[in-house]
Every structure is written in C-alpha cells, then in structure tokens.
Image: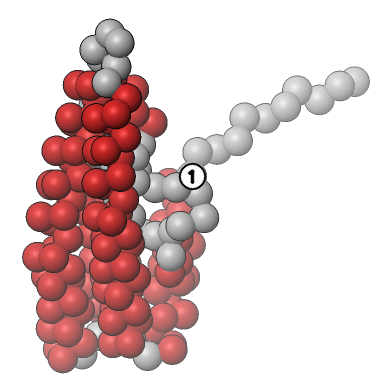
Amino acid sequence: MNKRFQALIGGAALASLLFAPLMISANAQTGGPGTPGRRPGMHGWFGGAPLISIALKHQTDLNLSADQVANLEKVRSNFQAQAMPIGQQLRDIEKQIRTLEQQSPANLVQIKALIQQSEPLRSELRYLRTEALENGKSVLSAQQQDQLKTILASMRQHFRKPQPQQPQAS
C-alpha cells in the first residue's frame, strides 16, 4: 500500500507538470512550498488526471497496440517539451511575486505587472493541456476510453479517504 501511495503522489506531481493547468496555488500565494495547483472546474477529460501516463501504465488492461503506445508516448513527450519551459517561467514569476509580497510595504505595481505577465503563460499551458488530452483521446477507441474511465473510477475509489461515521442517536 505504501508503494502505491508513493506512486500516486508521484503521479500527482507528474500531473501538475503534464496535465494540470498551472494555476496559482494557495501555497504559492502565501509563500509556502508547492507547485502551481488547479482551479475547481478546470480538470478536463476524466477529472484532470495524468491520463496519458495512466493509459500507458495500463496498456495491457486497455489492450493498446504498439502504434497506440508509440502515439501516446509521442503526445506526452511533445506536451512535456512545450509545457516545461512555460511551467518554469511561471514558477520563476511566482517566486518573484512571493518575494515582493514579503516586503513591507509590498510593491503592488510590480506584483500586478508580474501577475499580468503570467496570465498569457497560463493560457498557453491550458491550451497545450487541452490539445494533449484531445490528441491522447484520438489515439484511443471508444471502448478503450470507457475502460480508462473505469480504471480511473477504481483508482479514485481506492484512494478516497473513508468518511468518518456519525454516531447514531438512540
């Protein structure tokens, strides 16, 4: 179970690079450690998981052909090549913003300029993510897409925290 949890955490980290729109996280805004996070409602195909990586991990379950595997790997590597430099630029901007926010008084003009500088980068990442997801979907048959949905639902159920039981009133 511990190795599975570590794999999930690693997948989540990969998701932030591969398939999650790089948005300002609460940690980034408060100066804490972390990577840019996701905004609610912007999760994309099947909830924003690193779907191409999951599909590749479950290629046997999905009965992917060698061509499909090669195409999914190509989509993933193309996305990474395009998104990584943009993600680095955003992390650098967020670091500058956190530094400026810690000054007293904060330089609001510079902060605003940096925020405005980051928005086109966020838009580009969101588009690249959408493009990669669509390209990934186009590689899979409808049956494989349905099977991937089932795999993802199983993963979510497996790692979902159990809800605390409410004491029953007598």
Q: Determine whether, in the image, residue 46 is placed left or right of residue 170.
A: left
- Count every numbered label the image shows and give the total: 1
**In this view of the protein, which residue sits in the foreground, 27 or 164?**
27
Residue at 24% x, 38% y: name it: 114
In which image quadrant can residue 18 be found?
Answer: bottom left
Q: Spot the residue most to the top.
A: 104
Q: Quadrant of residue 56?
A: bottom left
Q: What type is the residue that disc 1 sits on?
A: Arg
Query: Measured from the top left, where is residue 140 in percent x and y?
Result: 33, 86
Q: Nearer the viewer, residue 35 or 5?
A: 35
Q: Secondary structure at mark 1?
A: loop
Residue 58 in sight from this viewpoint: no
Q: Is residue 155 left or right of residue 169?
A: left
User: In the rendered view of the protein, which quadrant contains the C terminus?
Assistant: top right
Residue occupying the far front of the picture: 109
Q: Dividing the image into 4 quarters, which one contains the N terminus?
A: top left
Q: Residue at x 29, y 29 (%)?
A: 109
Q: Which residue is labeled 1 in the image?
A: 160
x 26%, y 68%: residue: 128
Above-or-below relation of 64 to 21: below
Residue 18 visible, this angle? yes
Give the camera-side residue of 107 and 96: 107
Residue 86, position in %: x, y? 16, 54
Color style of the picture: secondary structure
Q: Residue at x 18, y 30 (%)?
A: 95
Q: Residues within 10 Å of mark 1 (few under 14, many from 20)?
A: few
| In this view, 134 is above or below 115 | below
Q: Is residue 8 left or right of residue 162?
A: left
User: 63 or 56, which is in the foreground?
Assistant: 56
The image shows residue 121, relative to residue 78, as above or below, that is above
Where is 107 relative to 38, above or below? above
